[in-house]
Image (cartoon, rainbow, N blue to C red):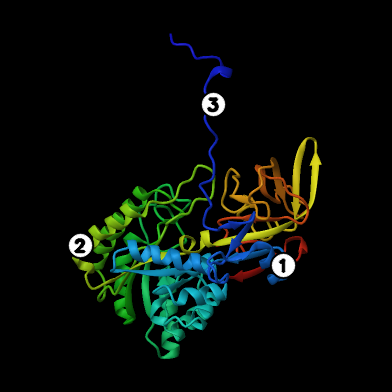
């Protein structure tokens, strides 16, 4: 019988670390952001930016990084693939306005987002509206605007037809499909299960027949199987299933399939041990699928991305107000927390809390490091931005940044919780 070596003699596995956060440069020990606004490619120092914003905490989004991400995708994706921005990831009007000149369309999750999209100048033909609880009022707004409504149920189909009849306008509709498959290893699965999103694939043919009876303007299909995936093989498998299912359903369509929205699901690394998604095999497989499925030769194929476009271009910035020691542990108490950045606190989708990448933005070159926890001002132990992280030694007045904060930060957080001051947003 083989015996195990004593516990204290076994080789220890190196702890997982965050993938390098090198998208923002540092100069003279200070983080910089905004390659366009700095004039010299180095951006603006974080202290100067805080003074310009007029307060901490705030979110800052980097225009150049948004440009670079879109350019990277354009270079790798097949030319036939259209790129849409999923506004729910970050609907800040300035960000949406910036994307209006970069992407081919917008995908919305509310009537308020639709107004921002239209104000940004995106043509209604390139806007689609999804979501499971669109009431008659919202549907009427969408029909009047001329955007495509992604139908989530049979009742919604009848309501959109009613809205069109009242306005004397033929509604533009697509069918959102709830497929029998899922996006494996996704951070959030939106297919393969009973779901409030979309129409079960086996019921879609009857819905298509009803669209024909109502003489609506059928545009195509929308299928979103999951989000936040870092495994190219899982994304490839989902794309394979998506094309096969939609080709089968196209046989029941009341007209040409003008648009096939294959969703997104591309993830970004947040936590220790995670690596960036390898896009190369995903894009090569899309080329193969476009060649294989001639039924979609005249169809606009759309990939809908939010987090992947904006997530890594954003920072959350807060200020150290106090430095406390308690029972041998050090706490950096900041004026930012879960009320502004729920996801970084671990209370937005995490089962076991893990740290976002965090830095002391005003001590980037310091070798004087210690293990600290970064907490916020709220009277709850849930208000935690970083737990027992090795960071440069910080003092009151230093600025803390949370990376990977461009998506699902500001608008996904309970900003009125305990009535602390609001945070700001800036595009630089």
Relative height, residue 303 to residue 188 (above, below): below
| Residue 223, percent from left and from top | 37, 63
The residue most toward the bottom is 168
Q: Are marks 2 and 3 in contact (CB under 8 Å)?
A: no
| Residue 93, percent from left and from top | 56, 76
Residue that appears at 41% across and 91% down? 168
Tell me how far mark 2 sits from mark 1, CA to CA: 51 Å
Residue marked by disc 2: 291
Relative height, residue 164 to residue 28 (above, below): below
- Count of labels shown? 3
Tell me how far mark 2 sits from mark 3, CA to CA: 49 Å
Residue marked by disc 3: 12
Give neighbour class at mark 1: few <14, some 14-19, many 20+ (Cα, 10 Å). Answer: some
Residue marked by disc 1: 422
Residue 325 is tagged as none
- Looking at the rendered image, the disc whose residue lies closer to the viewer, 3 or 1, is 3
> In which quadrant of the rendered view does residue 246 lie?
bottom left
């Amino acid at each position: 019988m083989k015996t195990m070596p004593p516990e204290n003699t076994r080789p220890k596995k190196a702890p997982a670390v965050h993938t390098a956060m090198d998208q923002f440069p540092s100069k003279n020990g200070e983080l910089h952001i905004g390659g366009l606004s700095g004039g010299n490619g180095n951006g603006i120092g974080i202290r100067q930016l805080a003074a310009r914003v007029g307060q901490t905490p705030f979110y800052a989004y980097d225009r150049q990084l948004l440009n670079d991400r879109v350019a990277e995708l354009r270079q790798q994706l097949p030319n036939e693939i259209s790129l849409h921005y999923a506004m729910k990831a970050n609907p800040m009007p300035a960000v949406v306005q910036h994307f209006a000149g970069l992407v081919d369309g917008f995908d919305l999750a509310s009537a308020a987002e639709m107004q921002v999209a239209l104000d940004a100048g995106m043509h209604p033909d390139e806007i689609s509206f999804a979501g499971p609880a669109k009431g008659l009022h919202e549907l009427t707004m969408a029909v009047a605007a001329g955007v495509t409504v992604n139908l989530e149920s049979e009742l919604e189909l009848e309501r959109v037809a009613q809205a069109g009849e009242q306005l004397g306008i033929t509604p533009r509709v697509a069918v959102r499909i709830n497929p029998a498959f899922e996006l494996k290893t996704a951070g959030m699965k939106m297919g393969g299960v009973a779901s409030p999103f979309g129409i079960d694939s086996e019921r879609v043919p009857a819905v298509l027949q009803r669209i024909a009876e109502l003489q609506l303007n059928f545009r195509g299909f929308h299928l979103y199987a999951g989000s936040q995936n870092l495994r190219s093989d899982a994304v490839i498998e989902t794309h394979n299933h998506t094309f096969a299912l939609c080709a089968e359903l196209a046989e029941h369509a009341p007209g040409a399939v003008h648009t096939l929205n294959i969703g997104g699901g591309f993830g970004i690394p947040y936590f220790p041990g995670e690596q960036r998604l390898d896009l190369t095999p995903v894009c090569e497989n899309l080329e193969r699928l476009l060649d294989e499925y001639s039924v979609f030769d005249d169809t606009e194929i759309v990939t809908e991305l939010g987090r992947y476009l904006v997530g890594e271009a954003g920072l959350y910035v807060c200020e150290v107000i106090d430095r406390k020691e308690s029972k041998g542990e050090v706490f950096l108490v900041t004026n930012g927390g879960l009320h502004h950045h729920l996801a970084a606190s671990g209370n937005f989708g995490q089962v076991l809390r893990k740290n976002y990448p965090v830095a002391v933005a005003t001590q980037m070159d310091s070798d004087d490091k210690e293990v600290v926890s970064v907490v916020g001002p709220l009277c709850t132990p849930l208000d935690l931005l970083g737990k027992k992280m090795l960071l440069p030694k910080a003092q009151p007045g230093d600025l803390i940044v949370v990376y990977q904060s461009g998506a699902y930060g500001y608008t996904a957080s309970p900003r009125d919780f305990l009535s602390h001051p609001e945070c700001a947003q800036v595009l630089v």
